[in-house]
Amino acid sequence: MGETGAKLRLIFDAIAQTRAVYLFDEFDSIGSERGLSNDVGEIRRVVNSFLQMVEQDESDSLIIAATNHPTILDRALFRRFDDIVEYSLPTEKEIIEALNFKFTSKRIADVVKWDVLAKRAKGLSYADVTRAASDAIKHALIERRELTSKDLTAAILERKGVLAHRKPAK
């Protein structure tokens, strides 16, 4: 944390010198709302520094920030970006479409009840749905057998379990 402000300065110096697209992924790690109960003062300085650097930026670079937790971002950050793009979680129909797209060239050994699978996957992002599908494929390949709907179900439930452990504390 103590070096974050200095590292931000290096990034913004690069932004000024080299025209490019700069992505701040997991932006909530440096853009959390100032004054939160767990704020030790350092995050406030980091957010203030970021706000000042963005305000002073006159480069032709594109600065993008991404987060899965927009509710914990400092509200002042939203005013510094020209556009806010929000992606919602896929519907059950969209989950089925994503899975069908993923499995167009793959054979599944048994009949898949896509609607049941989609209900189980509800609440996962597109990325998590496709990762679960990839995990199921890898699992079947490692075991040198055909992919089954049971593999898909297990991978989705495992992905949901992993996500349950990653939810931020309230």
Image (cartoon, rainbow, N blue to C red):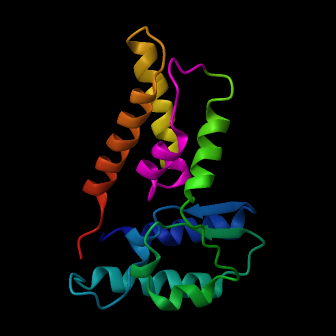
Give the residue displayed 35% in from the left and 86% down from the top.
44
Residue 113 lies, in percent from the top left, at 51, 37
For the C terminus, the image quarter is bottom left
Quadrant where the image shows the N terminus: bottom left
Q: What residue appears at the point 54 percent right and 21 percent down from the top-left corner?
A: 108
Q: Nearer the viewer, residue 56 or 109?
A: 109
In this view, the residue farthest toward the right is: 60
Q: Is residue 121 within the magenta segment?
A: yes
In the picture as drawn, the residue positioned furthest to the top comes out as 144
User: Above or below — where is 77 with respect to 120?
Assistant: below
Quarter of the view holding residue 153: top left
* Residue 53 belongs to the span the image colors magenta: no
Residue 43 lies, with reference to residue 92, above or below; the image says: below
Residue at 59%, 39% (x, y): give it. 99
Residue 154 in percent (x, y) is at 35, 34
Where in the figure is residue 89, as x and y percent of width and height? 53, 62
Instruction: Count how many numbered circles sit on residues in the image.
Output: 0
Residue at x 30%, y 48% (from the top left corner): 162
Which is nearer the eye, 130 or 55?
A: 130
Instruction: In this rendered view, identify the residue nearer to me: 96 or 10.
Output: 96
Tell me where residue 3 appears, x and y as whole percent.
Answer: 35, 68
The span shown in magenta is 107-127
Residue 2 located left or right of residue 156: left
Q: Is residue 68 above or below residue 102?
A: below
